[in-house]
Image: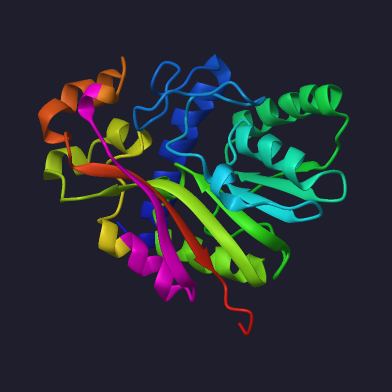
Amino acid sequence: MTVNKKHTTTHLLVKRAYGEVARNSTSCCSGSSCCGGAATSASEGDMGLSCGDPVAFSKLKKGMTVVDLGSGAGKDVFIAAEKVGHKGLSIGVDMTPDMLKLAAKNAGKFALRTGLKNVEFRKGVIEKLPVKNGEADMIISNCVINLSPDKPAVFREAFRALKPGGSIVVSDIVLNRELPPALKKHAGLYASCVAGALIRRDYLGAIKAAGFAWIKLLSDRLYSASGTCSDPITEKAGKALDGAASSITVLAKKPKTA
């Protein structure tokens, strides 16, 4: 299978899985986050698909432009929109049509609740962002980059889309050890944020290779199979997954001279 065909196949797998989530309005973990933490209900678009809270670490300011990679139903886009205010802009990028429809519906609810109309949802893949060079002050992502078939490309695109001096804050799943081959090929585990995850050093290395500096680990929590709620996929994997992965949040900056 060629690289491009493999990437297309992976995108289709993820679209199908998360399209079904959007249509059923249920999460992969029955209301809790992918990494086992409790989900919050602080925003429209909260479907329990998170593995961290990048907005909480982002130090967003009024007037900023923020881009969420793999925005889903819009949870983090809406939280960020309130922080950047009416003079700022919160942009969500997602490739799944059903998620974009749900996000648009949630945007209407958000506008009614807050009076803000500072959100946009753009269709596209995170390996080729529908974002101009230097358009963003901040890029965030929550349990999504692990689903990409080309994670280094995602970080290169994030670097391109950021203004010099801008930052990226990413919450994601990384592996602490290689998974057994049977689990790495498991489509359900891929869609559940585990099988497609990179080894930690490779993930952080991809951020550095994209040109980012001042890379800092903000949170680091061990993945536990016992925290996967009623998810039949990860329940079945059981002991093979226990301790194999961690949920991390990473901050990195684009140098001002870039």
In the rendered view, would you say 116 is above or below 219? above
Q: Is residue 209 magenta?
A: yes
In the rendered view, would you say 216 is above or below 60? below
Residue under the point 69% across and 62% down: 137
Q: Is residue 195 magenta?
A: no
Task: Give the mark count.
Answer: 0
Residue under the point 58% across and 37% down: 96
On the picture, is 46 further left or further right than 179? right
> Residue 138 lies in what quarter of the image?
bottom right
**Quadrant of the snapshot with the N terminus:** bottom left
Q: Can residue 229 be seen in this view?
A: yes
> What are the residue bounds of the magenta stretch?
203-226
In the rendered view, would you say 254 is above or below 234? below
Provide residue 178's location: percent of width, then percent of height.
Answer: 15, 50
Residue nearest the observer in this picture, 8 or 154: 154
Provide residue 135's location: percent of width, then percent of height.
Answer: 73, 64
Q: Find the residue positioned furthest to the bottom.
A: 257
Provide residue 144's location: percent of width, then percent of height.
Answer: 46, 44
Provide residue 18's location: percent of width, then percent of height.
Answer: 49, 30
On the picture, is 118 further left or further right than 252? right
Q: Can residue 9 be seen in this view?
A: no
Residue under the point 44% across and 29% down: 17
Residue under the point 68% across and 30% down: 103
